[in-house]
Amino acid sequence: MTNRDQELRQKAKETIKRYERLVQRDPYRLVYHLMPPIGLLNDPNGFIDWDGTYHLFYQWHPFEAAHGPKFWGHFVSGDLVFWEEKEPALTPSDWFDKNGCYSGSAVADNGKLKLFYTGNVKNENDERESYQCVAESEDGLTFTKKGVILHVPDGYTAHFRDPKVWKRDGIWYLVIGAQTKQVDGHVLLFRSDDLKEWQFAGIVTGSNVRSMGDFGYMWECPDLFHLDGEDVLLVSPQGLEKQGYLYHNVHNTGYFIGRLDYETGELVHGPFKELDRGFEFYAPQTTIDRYGRRILFGWMGVPDQGEEKHPTVKHQWIHAMTLPRELKLVDGKIYQRPVEELKQLRKNEVSRPSVKISEHPQRFEEISGEAFELLLDVEENQAEVFELTIRDNVRVIFNRGLKRLTLERVSFVDGLTESRHCELAELSSLHLYVDTSAVELFVNEGEEVFTARYFADPANRSIQFKTLHGSLTASLKKWALDSIMKK
Ligand code: FRU
């Protein structure tokens, strides 16, 4: 451990201590979502189920509720439900990562846990440099940096980051986000026998690659994996134009389904599909777990999207992770469902079978709260429009005539109502995880997902149901949810 590393760790501890009370006093602290103890959290990193423990690292800037030189924060869990915060795994303490230990991934190799990450450097002329680095650990708690393993290839700029590594048939592969000198976003594939020497294999896909037209100036956080018989590339391209209901956030995340040629690096793929329809979702990462499930965590935030306006900034913290979601491929589309284990958090079940919802706004006894799970199974829908309003801030609207599902919220930037939509042929169920300042909505068993932060009056716990033109009958179930942090 270098002096600089010790200094940074010490300073992070002191900052936590100094602001602990301010952070804890925030009514918007979440109950069952992972948050930074202080400062800013962004991407999930190094997600792995290793030796009986789930490890989730994250981009962390402890010193401000804003972006800065990132650490890798570290959460561990035995069961994907209850988590414990550990010492940070990496600090930006070396020449090759002094301006941030940026995003990356973890693999198990020879009894060691190895982290691959991007060292972000601003040189003396204030220009960006990027180094792909490795760190390893025998106990999964303390990591030794081993330095640089990969440099920016010819034809690409220093926007070269976020390595995701995996093994297939005894060979290691790595995908990474890149930007060409013509300012097109790409994903590149590299190959290695020993995790040290890496050879360029080819361009996976990218903006203006093969049949792709213009598709963004930089692609961040790629993840490539096999899911239900297909290869999937998950990626966050920057610079997409709005198109109908698509790409309304400042930066967006989606996936391609296809077949990867491991020799040429080429992914022959179909169209890009948006992964999440809400306001705050970016840079997700997956791993395969002990049960063979493909599990995803996303960052419940978007870079440069009103970040400084989040009310939590005044309490010295910002952002959170989504819940862990299991991925499945159904008819060429990724379905996301909250992992089964989350049922362990449920308490105080309230059940209302076959409730008829009509034009007259209705509230139901005990169906209210600020940190809860709500399941609505549609039995019969003859309403033109169905609306569910949470805490007078978030509204879910299904318009049967327009075949459209909408999530509305009161903007935390200007107080106006803003919305995101997707097409939806029919509504069969809504599964909502509502936390003090976050909502995750799973529609029709994960066919569509909307993720958003919202900042309602903390005293408001109301949930209201109503329709327009006709009624809807549904069964309702609600549970209060417990905290996920172990002390
Ligand atoms: C995505 C991202 C990554 C980068 C990291 C820095 O949100 O910009 O590309 O590695 O965040 O924190």
Image (cartoon, grey):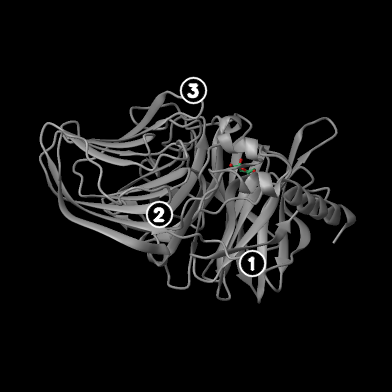
Q: Is residue 188 above or below residue 185?
A: below
Image location (x, y in percent) of residue 89: 71, 60
- Disc 1 target residue: 193
Image location (x, y in percent) of residue 402: 19, 31
Q: What is the three-letter code of the residue carrying label 1? A: Asp
Tell me which numbered mark, 3 or 1, is placed earlier along the sequence: 1
Residue found at the far right of this picture: 3
Dividing the image into four equal quarters, which quarter contains ligand 1? top right
| Residue found 62% across the figure and 36% down from its top | 313
Foreground tag (3 vs 2): 3
Q: Which mark is residue 259?
A: 2
The local secondary structure at tag 2 comes to: strand
Task: Tally the marks.
Answer: 3
Nearer to me, 446 or 189: 446
Q: What is the three-letter code of the residue carrying label 2? A: Arg
| Residue found 80% across the figure and 31% down from its top | 126
Q: Is residue 3 above or below residue 64?
A: below
Mark 3 to mark 1 CA distance (whole Å): 53 Å
| Residue found 42% across the figure and 63% down from its top | 345
Quarter of the image that includes the C terminus: bottom right
Mark 3 to mark 2 CA distance (whole Å): 44 Å
Q: Which mark is residue 414?
A: 3
Q: Is residue 200 above or below residue 417?
A: below
Q: Is residue 361 left or right of residue 56?
A: left
Quarter of the image that includes the N terminus: bottom right
Mark 1 to mark 2 CA distance (whole Å): 22 Å
Q: What is the three-letter code of the residue carrying label 3? A: Asp
Would you say residue 25 is visible in this rendering? yes
The local secondary structure at tag 1 comes to: loop
Nearer to me, 435 or 8: 435
CB contact under 8 Å: marks 1 and 2 = no
Would you say residue 39 is visible in this rendering? no
